[in-house]
Image: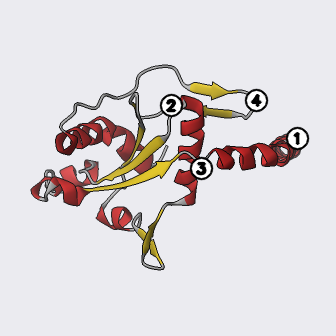
Amino acid sequence: NTKDIEHGNMCETHSIDMISTPTGKKMEKYEGAPFRDEELLLVGTPDVLHDEFIIDVKNPYNNRTFDNKIIIRDGKLVIDQVYYWQAQAYLHLCDREVFYLVYTLNEHKYMEAAGLDNYYSKFNLIDRMFVQKIKRDRSAIELYRERLPAIKREIEYQKEVLKLATMESVKYLEEMKGLV
């Protein structure tokens, strides 16, 4: 658990409420069971699951990390590849066609401790949000499906590496025990 993850979890509900204001529709946090596709090794729980779309909220830790999420290449906004693939997985799992990735800028504990709580709330709501739309691309899941054997091999390799590292650690801990 990191301060960034803690901040994201702490601000999630507030961020969903923030989205409700400009849309004029009350957005609700999805509280159901995770969606799964065992064959593709995919599991996911969207933040908001609507009949027509999915919303996933990201809460950058501060204005610098918020600004760093706005990526421009050749004069066009670019979607972070990690979130692109997360979107494609969610769209597949939830059988939706549209995914909105919403970054929101909210206060966090260190700001409150420094007496700066409500600092960001002084800004217009739209200045504290950045929204990207990602459409379902069925070819992305097919590409993932083609890569799945290599992904499974890598998972097995990593399990073996962890097993060997654990065995080695136990051996050296026993050795140290005998020397102490």
Relative vertical location of residue 172 with respect to residue 75 in this rendering, above or below: above
For label 1, the crowd category at 10 Å Cα-Cα, with few meaning under 14, some 14 to 19 and many 20 or more, is few
How far apart in space, not on screen, are marks 3 and 1 (Cα)? 35 Å
How far apart in space, not on screen, are marks 4 and 1 (Cα)? 31 Å
> Which label lies toward us, 2 or 4?
4
Do tag 2 and tag 4 residues touch (Cβ < 8 Å)?
A: no
- Earlier sequence position, callout 2 versus callout 4: 4
Instruction: Tell me, for residue 85, which label it has, or none.
Output: 3
Kind of residue sitting beneath label 3: Trp
Say which residue label 2 marks: 45
Observer able to see residue 122:
yes
Kind of residue sitting beneath label 1: Met
- Earlier sequence position, callout 1 versus callout 2: 2
Q: Position of residue 148 (x, y in %)?
A: 79, 43
Instruction: Tell me, for residue 167, which label it has, or none.
Output: 1
Element assignment for label 1: helix
Kind of residue sitting beneath label 2: Thr
Choose top left, top right, bottom left or bottom right for residue 41: top right
Image side of residue 52 versus residue 90, left or right: left
Observer able to see residue 180:
no
Q: Position of residue 128 (x, y in %)?
A: 23, 57
**Residue 129 or residue 11, whichever sits in front:** 129
- Earlier sequence position, callout 4 versus callout 1: 4
Image side of residue 32 versus residue 120, left or right: right
- Earlier sequence position, callout 4 versus callout 3: 4
Say which residue label 4 marks: 39
Element assignment for label 2: loop
